[in-house]
Image (cartoon, coloured by chain):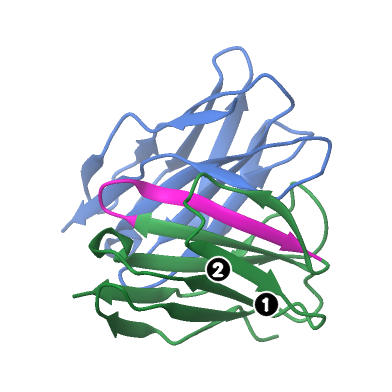
Amino acid sequence: AQSVTQLDSQVPVFEEAPVELRCNYSSSVSVYLFWYVQYPNQGLQLLLKYLSGSTLVKGINGFEAEFNKSQTSFHLRKPSVHISDTAEYFCAVSAGYGGATNKLIFGTGTLLAVQP
Amino acid sequence: KAGVTQTPRYLIKTRGQQVTLSCSPISGHRSVSWYQQTPGQGLQFLFEYFSETQRNKGNFPGRFSGRQFSNSRSEMNVSTLELGDSALYLCASSLDSGNQPQHFGDGTRLSIL
């Protein structure tokens, strides 16, 4: 069965500093990985996705993530954060049952708190 | 292009009542999924519909049900509400079959008194 672990529940960082949000996954089948962001009182917005191909994935708002199969990781990075990046970030894995479902399994989320 | 629309945004109910939540997917999307988000359990998958058929179901009691109409709009129903059903209910739509990126609505905040 698939699972996702986000080790950090909260990451404080100063504005303009780099940040990395960690995500590890467990899966016995092909994985499709996603990062979503949730701002207060809103739904989830897709930041980026890994379906296949290049292991370095670029997303919106300057975020990128690297798929590492040997370490079963999909960490999210941004070289310089802004106050507006303060939000909850969720890593998710798709079941990948030969394309039979869009079901996502989410990690517990990481609150990115950007301080001036 | 309009995004995923969920109605109502906020709902207050009492224990024992039932509730119906509505979701209109992005135009052209045929897959709709529902998730429950709570501080304690996080984001949990409820069910997924594709072309009016339930394709997948999460580990929730039978009080939780859903359906999808021919225009891909979906509803979920919760009967005999319990305090623990208080949550943000999120709907997501996808273009087609599996492993597609999902686009989420802003959710319905359900509070049970």
Asked whether B100 falls inside the magenta stretch, the response is: no
Which chain corresponds to the colour green? B
Asked if residue B107 lies left or right of residue A98, the reply is left
Mark 1 — residue?
Answer: B25
**What range is drawn magenta here?**
B38-50
Observer-nearest of B99 and B112: B112
- Determine the colour of chain A: blue
Quadrant (top left, top right, bottom left, bottom right) of the N terminus of chain A: top right
Q: Secondary structure at mark 1?
A: loop
State if disc 1 and disc 2 touch (CB < 8 Å): yes
Output the chain of dot 2: B
In this picture, is A31 found above or below A111?
A: above
Q: Where in the figure is residue A29, as x and y percent of width and height?
A: 72, 23
Chain-order first, disc 2 or disc 1: 1
Q: How many marks?
A: 2
| Residue B83 marker | none
Residue kind at label 1, given as amino acid type: Pro
| Residue B91 marker | 2
